[in-house]
Image (tube, rainbow, N blue to C red):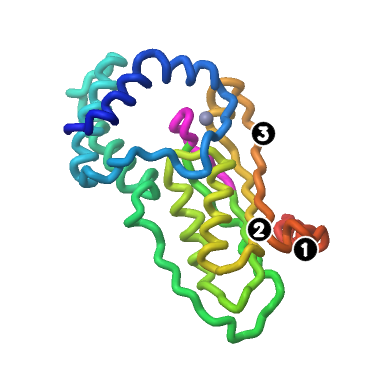
Amino acid sequence: MKLPETLLNTAELNGNGNGHAKAEAMGDAHVGTSKDTPLKADAFQLSDENKIEQIQEHFAAIMDILGLDLSDDSLSGTPHRVAKMYVKEIFQGLHPDNKPEIKLFENKYQYNEMLVERNITLHSHCEHHFVPIIGKAHVAYISNGYVIGLSKINRIVRYFAKRPQVQERLTEQIADELKRVLKTEDVAVYIDASHMCVSTRGIEDINSATVTSHYGGIFKSSDQKRNEFLQAIKD
Ligand SMILES: [Zn+2]
């Protein structure tokens, strides 16, 4: 693969201890750096098949360095399995082609109260450790004359979750997309999730969970609306 000169230089710079030092300094802080997922300009120049091929090679190298015998029956298929899982499953939300198409309907029911979709299954991956984030998302909106199919809310959550993520950014991205699609600021997103990088390594706290929220429009200005939402998502 040939990278444009400028990108190569950046890659080299980051690789020259600079990026490593930054990662060390960041440690387990889990602070996101941008609302947009940081992507390279040429992120989608390679086909999925080409990406799988290359990741497979690199993952085999990681296993080899770890000392694993790749000729073993149980391990020989792992590099391909992992590569395919990265591109086609757990990180498929990186590719704009996989963004769900949302059809907007007129609010013919004249339902003008809050709609809450709660307990949406959330499976994502922490971008600092590449291990799972597992939790639930709760979403609400108040129609501004338009509605979308209920399952489309799940699809939007799923699309942004299928990326290397930080929970803060994931929350904002879901809220932004819902606002854009529904043409309203009156959107609330609440995510309650466990991070495997906290529970299965490092501090190894299996009980802690992380809660993030975004309250737009009336959910921000009205305590009553916000409480109504929080009441609705209570178990
Ligand atoms: Zn992490």
Mark in the foreground, 2 or 3: 2
One can see residue 75 in this view: no
- Which residues, given as a range, are shown in magenta? 126-135
Q: Is residue 156 above or below residue 126?
A: below
**Alpha-carbon distance for marks 3 and 1?**
28 Å
Q: Is residue 167 above or below residue 1?
A: below
Label 1 within 8 A of ligand 1 by Cβ? no
x and y, in percent, of residue 28 in the image: 57, 23
The residue carrying pointer 3 sits among few (fewer than 14), some (14 to 19) or many (20 or more) residues within 10 Å by Cα, namely: few
- Residue at position x 52%, y 72% from top? 148
Badge 1 is on which residue? Answer: 225
**Alpha-carbon distance for marks 2 and 3?**
23 Å
Label 2 SS: strand
Badge 3 is on which residue? Answer: 208
Q: Is residue 132 above or below residue 97?
A: above
Which is more toward the observer, 135 or 26? 26
Which is more toward the observer, 113 or 65? 113
Mark sitting on residue 188: 2
**Is 8 situated left or right of 205 in this image?**
left
Is 155 one of the magenta-colored residues?
Answer: no
